[in-house]
Amino acid sequence: MSEFGGLEVVLRFLAEDLAELVDRLDNDLEHAKETGRALDEDEEIAERLRAEVEKMAQKRGIKSPPPDTTRSQETPLRAQTQAPIRLDWDALTAKARSDLLERNIDPTTVKVDDLLDRTEVERIERRHNGGFEVRGRLDPYDLTAALAAGVVGAMVDYLVVKIPSTTFWEGSIQTGSAMTGALRDLSLDSDNWLAVLARVPFDRVIGTGIPGFIPQSHRVQTFGHDPLFGLGMGVIDIIRGTLTGIDPTGDVAVIASPGLQVANPALAFGLEVLHLLSDVGTRSGLPLPGWTALLTLKSGSFGETDQTLAELSRWMFMRGYDSWHFLTMSTSVAAVEATLRAYFALRQQHDEAYRADAEAEAARADSDRTSDHPRYQAMSLLAHGTAAAGNLGKLALAGGNPLT
């Protein structure tokens, strides 16, 4: 072997991985073009590596490594039958340095990593390893934009979202959201045509025998009206002709409600969905998905009256914490996303170097969606974290009012 056998090993491993990639072309025609480009890139890297080795050999007065005679130059790579050796870049360079030491060559004078720039080394590592880690590196402008987007979201939360309705809390009156009020004014009548069509057994308001079961709270006290649990328990209620309700203390009761049961599960499911749609547009709206389960939690002590979590959850719904206010709350999240996406798009449009970095990161993440971009995800995490911190400040300023 030559004096630079270690470096030759590196080239050999690269060539063997090229053979593997060529074989994959036969088995995966859908990715033929992409894999072909990868092969061309690896051949260019191999040629560049050989050129660097020859330059170093000439400077040291050492003859260049002889060509590999174990393979015919006329034999195509796809004809090689030897199984490729899977080693990562660190293992390859360690092997090369070991061979150099065997030939009494100081490895510190031959730095294999220096023969390629860092981006090429990273690309080779990704090709030789089973996977890779996506990193989003933020510069000062990215950090500033993320923090600014978070502040925008916090300001929208404080000035627009506020609380669902004007409420007396801890000795003071707190003003409700004008946006939630305006949305609620667009509501439909509770006896709309869809409600008449999709009558269900758990929609009873009176005569249930459940304490605290009133028209203003019956939707949050029945699992059938929960957009999440209703798709299961609500359907069961329709099939059985029952009402599964919760009293203010957190106890669950099942009440017979005959006359509206539907035995067919598919029809019962369709009826459940239609009933939810008929209620969501009315003035009382629907509980947030999964909210009804909170009414079963009997622990905790909140507010001046020492309410449990169950009592507090019911109180919040009756104060307007429902699907209407959910739309208002989404404006804070939307403000963060809009600000951040505008910055990300404009920065790429006016900064060519930034756009090149962003495109390279998107390629490594194998996605062209902004929400999947590693740099954007890092900024989004920081921005939404800042907005969430602002919401905690809003909670403190409101004296701990849970409606915030």
Image (cartoon, rainbow, N blue to C red):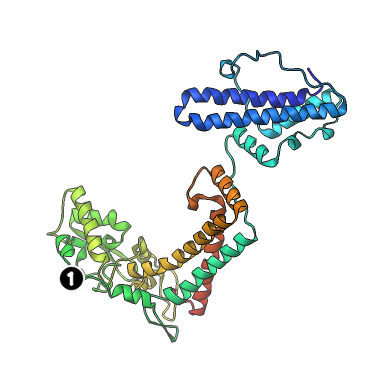
Instruction: From this view, report whether residue 403 is shown above or below residue 71.
Output: below
The quarter of the displayed image where residue 16 is located? top right
Instruction: From this view, report whether residue 193 is shown above or below residue 95.
Output: below
Query: Which residue is drawn at the image coordinates 31% and 59% (left, top)?
Result: 227
Query: Which residue is drawn at the image coordinates 54% and 70% (left, top)?
Result: 151
The quarter of the displayed image where residue 271 is located? bottom left
Instruction: From this view, report whether residue 207 is shown above or below residue 227.
Output: below
Name the residue nearer the viewer: 177 or 61: 61
Q: Amino acid at mark 1?
A: Gly
- Residue 360: image location, x then y, percent: 58, 45
Asked whether residue 81 is in view, the answer is: no
Quarter of the image that includes the N terminus? top right
Asked if residue 355 lies left or right of residue 261, the reply is right
Quarter of the image that includes the C terminus? bottom left
Asked if residue 27 lies left or right of residue 147, the reply is left
- Residue 306: image location, x then y, percent: 43, 77
The quarter of the displayed image where residue 247 is located? bottom left
Residue holding disc 1: 207
Asked if residue 385 lies left or right of residue 275, the reply is right
